[in-house]
Image (spheres, coloured by chain):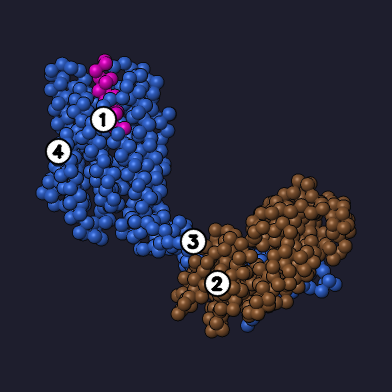
Amino acid sequence: MNPLVFGAVAYDPKVVTIWSGFRSWLRARQLAFDFVLYAHYERQAEDLVGGRIDVAWHSPLAWVRTRRLARAAGVDVRPLVMRDTDQDLTSVIVVRADSSAAVVGDLKDKTVAVGAIDSPQATLIPLHHLRELGVDADAGLRVVRHDTGVGMHGDHIGGEREGARALLAGRVEATCMTDTNHLAFAQDGTFPPGSTRVLTRTAPYDHCVLAAGPTLTAGAGQQLTALLLSMSYADPELRHLLDLEGLTRWVPARETGFAQLTDAVDATGFYDPDGRVTAVGYRP
Amino acid sequence: MTARPRPAAVVRLDLSGLGFDQGAHLLLRRALEEAAPDRQVAVWGTHPALLYQLTVWCRREGHLVTPAPPDQAPLCAHVTPGAHVTTRWEGADRAGSAGPGGAVRRPPLHWGLAARGALVEEGGPEVYFAVADRDTAWTDLAPRLYRQATAAQWDPDTAVPWDAPFSLPDGIERAVVQVMTFLVENEQAALVVPGRLLAQVHPHFREVLQLLAVQAADEARHVEVFTRRALLRGGEMGTSSVGGRASLATLLREPDFSIASFLLSVLGEGSFLNLLAFLERYAPDPVTRRITHLVRQDEARHVAFGLGHLEHRSTVDPPLRGRLRAAVERRHEVLVHTAGLNTDVFDALVLLAAGSWSPTAIERGWRAVQRLRADMDEGRRHRLSRLGFTDDEAADLSQLHTRNFM
Ligand SMILES: [Fe+2]
Ligand SMILES: [Fe+2]
């Protein structure tokens, strides 16, 4: 039997450790599993829909594009599982504690830092959130992008960290990041205690999904899903891999958490309805 | 009859004004461990961003948050611990126990650098140590010898009368410098070998590592004081012969822990005890007398450890004696065509015991060095018989020992 081929984006060296480890664990349980690594999500999404890989570990943005590409090609794709830690995330727009901005409207004519051009959590979703609240370029908002790891859909934390530094240095009035990174920056000392304030927070959304492409058979899909859901933190072979990947267990995927991102993609024309890349200045 | 107090249905945690950017997660983690597996933590607190921070932290760590109705403030939320709180330590085991008798026979390699007696999480990398068996590594003497060794450390600057006035005839000073040059070379071998052995021993046998580390520190001091004495009168170092270096090179090549410690400590450092006593006795100046005295005390401990270790080993593993014997024979064969002791060193020893170049003095010195060799031989035979060799075997092996002394 041909092994199923899984794709992941190599945004960090740990990706090799994680998926090599999961691969031997899955193979020991009679699932023939190979993986390939991509430099960015756009090719991975195209290859999943084109049948060159069977399954992909997708960013939410790659999932939005995959849905569109599949509809245009008339093929079937489906989400299998997610990390427990990837449901109901929010992004926050943070100002310095001593900032004069008290409400979102105070950001008019001000500068806000965001992550990379293709970051759902640090650019697309928070800017869409501000736009809905009436704060955008038309209202004089200036945006400073931090394009670290373009094509990795914001997986690289560098853009958010640079935005945080710009905020502390007073170069920007506000900056955007996930709530998780906001807490992490407070805990690792990037933000001294009490130095920042959350000006506004987006509605909850979901993050990465493990997505099946048209070539994955129902049987293999069920077997892979069942094995992933059975992964236990009690298993010493898996525990450090789960820690590295940042989850405590896999949960069944759902599609209810991508509405804000879809709206943001449409509002900015990041992809067209058929999944073509239409964002200006985006070169993964 | 009174019923045992039942644990409260929830664990109450009052964070007061503390936030998650100020360490609140330490308190919550502790409360979750107490509450797991089937109770909740009720979190109280007044930090303005508490519910936000609590929700984010718990999502990242895999715990479920149920916010409390706002009218119940300062009660913030109830937290249900994720299953992993208890499962993380399910397969963990204790790495023996911490005390002196607490080493297990064969510590698993995944215990790695964990402290003896620690609760070791299951899994993790296996760290290879060649000596991972109590019978190979362990000697019951190690804790006591380690304590003695740390208590007996001396400071070369203050323990030796470097400024004591003396003056020696040129020839005698040169003889001292030649002997010091020889000693430094041997001490460097004695420094490298325990350093290498140390890295082979599973850290579970921490007393053995500690003792070897102090032994290496002793040797570092020996290198220092012998070098310092050699340079004390502004002269140059003496000679280093091929035969001497060949002999020491065979010590460095020996990979087996027990055999290396046999060749170095029991036979080599054992012979050095006699040499150092000889030098202390015939030292022509107070500095040489003092440093040979101090070094000899350290070497006595090194010999005691090597001997204790091998005594223990040869009782639990009688065939070891055959391997020790073969190692001495092998080394002899490698060295048989080398010159042995540097003749400059031999001549220097004669002159030091003679005290002058007069023929009667030289004759006296010559006899003293012959006696030194006989003493070394007797000492080696004595130590070999403690390891269970018969008198004949001990005499044979002692004869085969390197003529370089170490
Ligand atoms: Fe020494
Ligand atoms: Fe020594």
Task: Give the overall secondary structure of the magenta segment.
Answer: helix
Q: Please, what is the three-letter code of the amino acid marked with disc 4? A: His
Residue B309 visible in rendering: yes
**Residue at 81% from the left image edge and 64% from the top image edge:** A129
Residue B87: x %, y % from top left? 55, 72
Residue B148 visible in rendering: no
Marks 3, 4: nearer the viewer: 4
Left or right: residue B46 compared with residue B294: right
Colour brown belongs to chain = A
The mark found on residue B337 in the picture is 4
The N terminus of chain B: image quadrant: bottom right
* Residue B183 belongs to the span the image colors magenta: yes
The residue wearing badge 2 is A52
First to last magenta residue range:
B169-184
Cβ–Cβ under 8 Å for marks 2 and 1: no
Which residue is outermost to the left? Answer: B392
Q: Please, what is the three-letter code of the amino acid marked with disc 1? A: Ser
Q: Name the one closer to the observer, B130 or A222.
A: A222
Circle 4 — which element? loop
- Write down the quadrant of residue B21 in the picture: bottom right
Residue A103: x %, y % from top left? 88, 59
Left or right: residue B63 compared with residue B141: right
Q: Name the one closer to the observer, B252 or B398.
A: B252
Left or right: residue B311 compared with residue B109: left
The residue wearing badge 1 is B240
Ligand 1 within 8 Å, label 1 CB: no
The mark found on residue B118 in the picture is 3
**Residue at 59% from the left image edge and 76% from the top image edge:** A213
The answer to whether tags 2 and 1 share a subunit is no
Colour blue belongs to chain = B
Circle 2 — which element? loop
